[in-house]
Image (cartoon, rainbow, N blue to C red):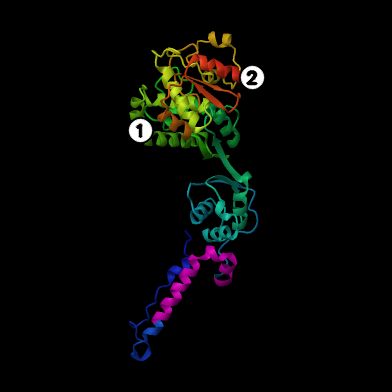
Amino acid sequence: GHRRDARSGRGGVRRGRGKGRGRGGKPKKRRSGLACLVVVVVFGGTVAGVGYFGYQFYQDRFGAAPDYAGGGTGETVTVEIPKGALGNEIGQALKQAGVVKSVDAFVAAQSQNPDGKSIQAGAYLLHKEMSAESAVEMMLDPKSQNNVLVRPGERNKAVYKAIDEQLDLSSGATEKIAEKNFKSLGLPSWANDDSDIKDPLEGFLYPGTYPAAKGMKPEAVLKAMVTQAANKYKALDLEAKAKALKLDSPLQVITVASLVQAEGKTADDYRKMAEVVYNRLDRANPETYGMLQFDSTFNYLKGESNINISESEINKNQDPYNTYTQKGLPPGPIGNPGDGAITGTLNPTDQGWYYFVAVDGVSKTEFAKTHEDFQKLKDKFNESTGN
């Protein structure tokens, strides 16, 4: 991935004037042409291999690649490095932004730094006119890496807050933009098909790391997240999957996945949790008659994460997201599910699960098929949490 020095492109076997004849019209010996060709090949090969032999070798042989000196000016600039970019492409992005003077200087400095190959994709806040060596060092410093991380299960409100902080915006700015511009961010056509949905982007800010640095617009960051979700969901063919799972729409698949993500902890949990949801959604089921009764949906509508919710508080709340008082699924997702929860949602177990309890109150989930077994698990939970 190293760019050949411009000078190596000038070579090739130079054609002597007089079509190969020297002075006096005698044919030149072929040997000299071959020697010239060998020199060019070796020269070209050396430049292409600069990354391997290091900056010093490059300087000794060909003179230094154009470079700035020092840590740059006071002016900062955000540079976005795409996934899979190699040294040459990174160098080009930096040169274009006015950070380094030449691509070759960056490639050489990156190869000279023992950690140079670990530069990640993302947004970087750098100075203009830096030496290539300083640019590499700054890109390897976590403080220069400007990204927002969406964790599996994270709610949009937390993501909006992280974007505000990363872009140095006033609190609530990203949320307002999301409310106003959600239709222009690339949502699939099947999204937002319920008027009770609290946030049409919930479930569409796909977990992962996204470039987000001062100077970038929140719309651009949100669009990257929504695009990632739309591409993932399209690849899964959720329209067909929804039918196979007896759900009304692809949005309901994501809603189930968000519940599975909120309540499950492991890949095994996710598959069982998905079965719990599907079994409970059956209005004729003899255990819950169509009631999901998930704490996570109540916590979502309250904007909390509480494991001890009083029954009286739950039972008097008639919000569409309260699955203790409303039958069926909530109107939309309650968070952003990750790969594991989505896979579990599409591949549920078939073992008769209707109940679950996080028996240690944190991470160990156990499942039950009858209300009687569920009561035993609740007793176990009360013992371990001291309730």
Question: Is residue 386 in view from this perspective?
Answer: yes
65, above or below 282, in the image: below
Please state the horizontal and vertical placement of residue 324, each as a whole percent of the image.
Answer: 50, 13
As rendered, which of 5 and 382 lies closer to the eye?
382
Tag 2's secondary structure? helix
Report how far apart the C-alphas of labels 1 and 2 lie in the structure: 44 Å
In this view, the residue in front, 294 or 354, is 354
Quadrant of the image occupied by residue 238: top left
Q: Position of residue 344 (x, y in %)?
A: 44, 30
Query: Label 1 crowding class (10 Å Cα cut-off): few <14, some 14-19, many 20+?
Result: few
| Image point (58%, 71%), residue name | 60
Q: Position of residue 323 (x, y in %)?
A: 48, 15
Residue at left offset 33%, top offset 25%: 243
Front of the two marks 1 and 2: 2
Q: Residues within 10 Å of mark 2 (few under 14, many from 20)?
A: few
Quickly name the residue at label 2.
Answer: 383
| Left or right of residue 57, residue 277 in this image | left
Extent of the magenta region: 33-61
Identify the residue under disc 1.
Answer: 237
- Earlier in the chain: of badge 1 and badge 2, it is 1
Magenta run includes residue 40:
yes
Quarter-wise, where is residue 378 in the image?
A: top right
Residue 336 is at least partly visible in this image: no
For the residue marked with disc 2, what is the amino acid?
Glu
> Mark 1 belongs to which amino acid?
Asp
